[in-house]
Structures are given as C-alpha cells and as structure tokens.
Amino acid sequence: MGGRFGKIWPPKIRIIGLTQLLTQMFALYIILAAGTSIPYLINYSTNRVICFVFAVFFFGNTFLNFFSPSKKEKVVMTPMSLISAVCFLIVGICM
C-alpha cells in the first residue's frame, strides 16, 4: 500500500489487502505443490505455468516496491519480493 495509510486501513483498502492475502496464500500452495510438499490439486503443467506467472508478478512487485515512498517497504518488502520471484523462477525451471 506504499505506506500511505497508517496502522488502520480504510474499508475499501481492506478488501484489497484481503485480495493480496488470498493471492499470497495461493502462491504458497503453488510453491509447496511444485516442491511436492503437498499434493497437487492443479495438474503439473498448469502448476509450472503458474510458477512462471508468479515469478513475473513478484519481479514486477520488486520493481514497484523499490520506488515506494515507504522506507520500511523498500527495506523489508523489496528483498522479500525479490527472493520470492527467484524462488518461483527456480521452481518453474526445475519442474
């Protein structure tokens, strides 16, 4: 959210936050299923494509976090997003 809001988000922004949370949970499922830590609910080839989609998503997220006005977001979230992108890329290639 770029650090524009304090600790309490406005109601409309909370819906966006929930969407982000659900996206992150889906990404977690995809990476765990790709690593065979949990069973596949989505077929192998689709899972691989989704890994590449999330890699692109997180690389874009890294780029946008780098230009965030929030120092905390730059320092904390940019490296985490980059690590996530690299993990998804490696898993997508190695599948």
Image (cartoon, grey):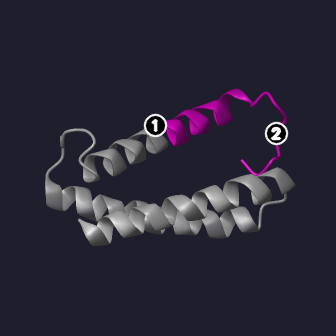
Q: Residue at x 23, y 47 (%)?
A: 36
Q: Residue at x 73, y 67 (%)?
A: 66
Q: Nearer the viewer, residue 12 or 55?
A: 55
Tell me the magenta residue range: 1-22
Among numbered discs 2 and 1, the one appearing first in the sequence: 2
Q: Is residue 23 left or right of residue 76?
A: left
Disc marking residue 5: 2
Relative to 92, residue 76 above or below: above
Q: Please name the amino acid that badge 2 sits on.
A: Phe
Q: Position of residue 29 (x, y in %)?
A: 34, 42
Mark 1 Cα-neighbour bin, 10 Å: few <14, some 14–19, many ≥20: few
Q: Nearer the viewer, residue 92 or 66?
A: 92
Alpha carbon distance from label 2 to label 1: 20 Å
Secondary structure under the numbered disc 1 in the rendered image? helix
Q: Which residue is mark 1?
A: 22
Q: Position of residue 11 (x, y in %)?
A: 68, 27
